[in-house]
Image (cartoon, helix red, strand yellow):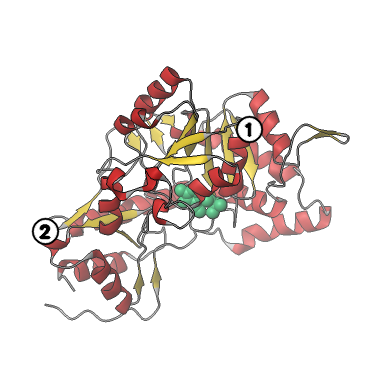
Amino acid sequence: MRKIRKFKKPIYVTQPYLPPLKEFVPYLKDVWDSKWLTNMGKYHQQFEKELADYLGVKHICLFANGTLALMTALQALRITGEVITTPFSFVATTHALHWNGITPVFCDIEPEYCNIDPDKIESLITPRTTAILPVHVYGNPCQVDKIQKIADTYGLKVIYDAAHAFCVRINGTSILNYGDLSILSFHATKVFTTFEGGAIICHDEKMKKRIDYLKNFGFADEVTVVGPGINAKMNEFSAALGLLQLRYIDKALEKRKKIAQLYRKKLAGIPGIRFLNDIPGVKHNYAYFPIFIDEKEYGKTRDEVYDELKKHNIYCRRYFYPLISQFSTYKGLSSASPENLPNAEKIAKEVLCLPIYAEINLSTVIKISHILKNQI
Ligand SMILES: Cc1ncc(COP(=O)(O)O)c(C=O)c1O
């Protein structure tokens, strides 16, 4: 077994890709001089248009973050009662339901790509069910056609939490064109960042108008408030950064693809380590590089591997452990019982997301792979 030296600087699971500062300064100066800092200013308007063109979607409403976008999407469609969702996500997915007074109903996931299992949705539908809230986990598309078929049969809305799925396409079409609404996050940990930020993608002008009112306290004009809106607007600094980021995103995605390909090459054939491959017809964004550790075959538990990597100064993340259904707010729900969620329970114990970001050194990826290969 080769001795591998600890990394001098910590290697985190991700790192934001930022444009050269000198290119951002003129935008900053312009916002400064104009004194128009927020409230749908010129950068907000320009970014909405350019982003919609870039992603290949009809309408985008920019938000201060993905969580507010989710909360507002539920309001925009007047979702109430129960919503069927996944426990295998970042906790904001379910919190958005809770903040709207909606009861989450957890559905198990399929064991390969870790998305909601469409075959288990129907049995969870009750007279109180109004919508399905799936997540394109790690940016891998849910089984959108099956989900839509169920929604159409039962008259349900579909809101996709596409926080991980920036730029993902199926057979040339943006993944964001599926469902009634999709939301994005531009948090610093995401493939595409505007410091903090988010968006709702919708398919018609009327809905865009409604969402735009809701994200601005419900104001339709100076004297008309159409509903209980919130303050969820993206500011001009974030919008300006977003515009600049659009010039660099293709390069960043290309680099991520290379990192994923290198991991796959180096980790192939290690007994007890599984990773995800590309899906035919899908344009991936390589937002995450999850591996799944079978402790019997590999000889160590996921948590032992996680701790060992930490000793090497490598900070992986156990996305998503614990399951949302295990948090105190939700674990009393009947749908949260572990026996209802066998795949999610198993995967939450096996998963480890390895560092992946555009500027990670290839030599770092090789070292991490060696550590895993030598079983540390
Ligand atoms: C799946 C998922 N949904 C929602 C969010 C919330 O987005 P934000 O941090 O922009 O509020 C995140 C991550 O942050 C996420 O990973």
Mark 2: amino acid: Pro
Residue 256: where, in percent of width, then height? 37, 53
Q: Earlier in the sequence, mark 2 or mark 1?
A: 1
Residue drawn at x 56%, y 34% is 201
Is residue 352 placed above or below 213 in the rendered structure? Answer: below
Q: Disc 2 and disc 1: Cα gap in Å?
A: 48 Å
Residue 188: where, in percent of width, then height? 53, 58
Q: Is residue 113 left or right of residue 230?
A: left
Residue nearer the viewer, 192 or 178: 178
Residue 170: where, in percent of width, then height? 37, 31
Q: Is residue 207 visible?
A: yes
Mark 1: amino acid: Ala
Residue drawn at x 38%, y 47% is 336
Which quadrant of the view contains residue 108?
Answer: top left
Q: Which residue is mark 2?
A: 271
Quadrant of the image containing the C terminus: bottom left
Quadrant of the image containing the N terminus: bottom left
Residue nearer the viewer, 192 or 340: 340
Q: Is residue 73 left or right of residue 176?
A: right
Q: Is residue 77 left or right of residue 170?
A: right
The tag on residue 236 is: none
